[in-house]
């Protein structure tokens, strides 16, 4: 019997309980290797590399975000940079959680093959660390803890860089006590999840992949925000939640870089691997499209999983 549990049904989560179980959240912007096409980047990441991380012990949950700067429709703030230089743009953003430092060390011990694989498709991966309780789900009306990327909702990840004359304490106070609570009151939001970042340091080592940026090019926070559609976002941009915080938002942040999430895909949830994590995104999509429910049976998934982790301490 395989030691990795296969997720067969994701029920609603109590976010206060689940967030409290997490010691470390990693937000990992990925930039494609210059020598490959963007199509090949997505094909390799989502159908080859994707099956590696969720198999290893230590990692609790993994969500993958396929993102686009060109397609984002987040409202602009006057005097605030709204898009990074091309060299700093990224094409995908995994989010990974760990219950303890021991679990991170365990994952690092077993995942050498994954780290070496990064050089096949990545030019850069920046690991932004959010320490508990600095990652928190503030609003979630979706009741879908394991999205498969087919919900048709309007998602953005919004990355924040503070102004040079704003202290990290004042920045965090604004984000945590003014901005996010105001947004949470907006009825148009379907989901709001906030992260406060530490300064970047080497956390997951991919040989041959750039893993650091100077402090002035790092982000200090990010949030995930979901609306039903662009009309709901437009309503939000005209609401008190946006208008009453916009001036202080612009005074606090030098850059607000929003990326549209074209797909959000779960490959592991609370220690249980999903069909996409076992088989890759294209295969999981085909199984769903054809209604091949027998392929979702744990006994089938176990044929594709090794016993890695059975002897884990």
Image (cartoon, rainbow, N blue to C red):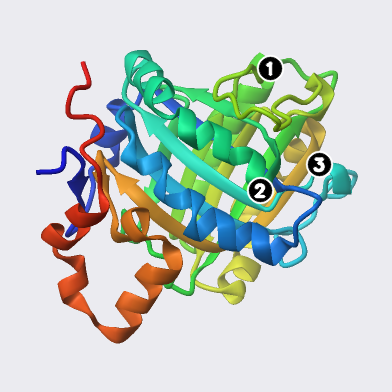
Numbered disc 1: secondary structure: helix
- Residue 237 visible in this rendered orientation of the protein: no
Q: Position of residue 196 (x, y in %)?
A: 56, 27
For the residues bearing labels 2 and 3, Cβ distance under 8 angstroms: no
Name the residue beneath numbered marker 3: 88
Circle on res. 290:
none
Mark 2 and mark 3: Cα distance apart in space: 16 Å
Which mark is in front, 3 or 1?
A: 3
Residue 250, compared with residue 205, is above or below; it is below
Residue 208 picture location, percent across and down: 70, 30
Please name the residue that numbered disc 1 is placed on. Answer: 168
Q: Residues within 10 Å of mark 2 (few under 14, many from 20)?
A: many
Q: Is residue 50 left or right of residue 218?
A: left
Vertical placement of 152 versus 123: above or below? below
Residue, x 52% and y 44% (percent of image)? 94
> Foreground mark, 2 or 3?
2
């Amino acid at each position: 019997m395989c030691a990795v549990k296969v997720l067969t049904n994701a029920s609603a989560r109590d976010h206060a309980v689940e967030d409290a179980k997490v010691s470390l959240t990693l937000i990992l912007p990925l930039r494609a290797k210059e020598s490959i096409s963007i199509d090949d980047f997505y094909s390799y990441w989502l159908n080859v590399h994707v099956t590696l991380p969720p198999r290893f012990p230590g990692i609790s949950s993994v969500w993958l975000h396929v993102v686009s700067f060109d397609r984002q429709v987040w409202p602009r703030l006057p005097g605030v940079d709204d898009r990074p230089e091309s060299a700093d743009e990224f094409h995908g953003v995994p989010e990974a959680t760990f219950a303890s430092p021991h679990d991170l060390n365990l994952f690092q011990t077993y995942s050498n093959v994954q780290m070496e694989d990064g050089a096949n498709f990545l030019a850069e991966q920046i690991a932004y660390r959010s320490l508990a309780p600095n990652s928190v789900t503030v609003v979630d009306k979706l009741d879908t803890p394991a999205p498969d990327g087919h919900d048709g909702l309007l998602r953005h990840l919004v990355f924040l860089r503070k102004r040079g004359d704003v202290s990290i304490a004042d920045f965090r106070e604004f984000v945590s006590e003014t901005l996010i609570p105001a947004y949470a009151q907006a009825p148009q939001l379907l989901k709001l999840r906030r992260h406060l970042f530490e300064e970047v340091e080497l956390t997951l080592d991919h040989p041959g992949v750039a893993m650091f940026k100077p402090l002035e090019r790092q982000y200090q926070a990010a949030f995930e925000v979901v609306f039903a559609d662009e009309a709901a976002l437009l309503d939000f941009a005209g609401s008190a939640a946006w208008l009453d915080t916009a001036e202080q938002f612009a005074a606090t942040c030098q850059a607000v870089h929003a990326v549209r999430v074209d797909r959000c895909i779960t490959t592991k949830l609370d220690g249980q691997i999903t069909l996409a994590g076992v088989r890759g995104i294209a295969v999981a999509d085909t199984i769903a499209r054809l209604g091949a429910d027998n392929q979702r049976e744990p006994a089938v998934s176990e044929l594709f999983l090794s016993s890695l982790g059975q002897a884990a301490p």
